[in-house]
Amino acid sequence: MRKALFVSVSLIFFLCFSGTAKAEIDAGKLFKTHCVPCHGEDGRGTDLGKGLGVPDLTNAEWQKTRPDTRFVEQILKGSEKMFAFKDKLKMEEVQALLAYVRNFAQR
Ligand code: HEC
């Protein structure tokens, strides 16, 4: 009897845990939803983005000149031409996007 209880409690824990794992942040999807209209799927910038002056995010040399804090600030506060995302994204999502953007320079 006790054993059965233990098993079902473990099962509940397992189900809860796999539930949160599923809710993990999908940076690729976030980028697609919020950033691709200007930065493009490949990070090089769409025509619209280039018109606004987006940097080529795949440029590793340029990325080296930009600290993480600079990128995070840009995403949170935006600029004259880029929207601010501080009300749309959670901090963990911004961190995930930062990693995603960094990844462009390594492809
Ligand atoms: C409306 C178009 C637009 C959208 C949408 C947009 N950006 Fe930008 N982004 C820009 C422009 C334009 C720049 C160039 C710098 C500037 O003028 O602000 C830029 C610059 C950047 C930079 C470089 C900042 C630096 O160091 O100069 C990063 C990183 C960045 N964007 C990330 C993102 C991410 C991540 C998203 C999605 C959450 C996003 N952008 C959505 C237009 C956009």
Image: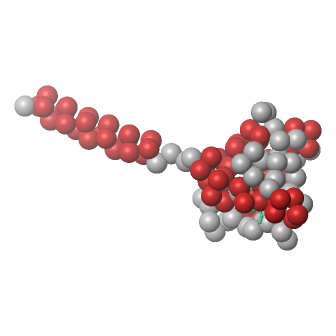
Please report the residue visible at 71 percent of the width from the left and 55 percent of the height from the top: 36
Please report the residue visible at 78 percent of the width from the left and 47 percent of the height from the top: 43
Q: x and y percent of residue 76 in the render?
A: 73, 62
Q: Is residue 50 above or below residue 99?
A: below
**In-image side of 91 versus 42 (left or right):** left
Q: Is residue 75 above or below residue 7?
A: below
Number of numbered markers: 0
From the image, which quarter does the N terminus lie in?
A: top left
Q: Residue furthest bottom?
A: 80
From the image, which quarter does the C terminus lie in?
A: top right
Instruction: Give the color scheme: rainbow, by chain, secondary structure or one colour.
Output: secondary structure
Q: x and y percent of residue 47 in the render?
A: 83, 59
Q: Nearer the viewer, residue 3 or 79?
A: 79
**In-image side of 51 versus 2 (left or right):** right
Q: Nearer the viewer, residue 1 or 16?
A: 16
Please report the residue visible at 75 percent of the width from the left and 68 percent of the height from the top: 83
Q: x and y percent of residue 104 in the render?
A: 77, 40
Q: x and y percent of residue 22 in the render?
A: 44, 44
Q: Is residue 49 above or below residue 102?
A: below
Q: Nearer the viewer, residue 30 or 7?
A: 30
Please report the residue visible at 81 percent of the width from the left and 63 percent of the height from the top: 48
Q: Residue furthest top?
A: 3
Q: Nearer the viewer, residue 49 or 4?
A: 49
Residue 41 can be seen, yes or no: yes
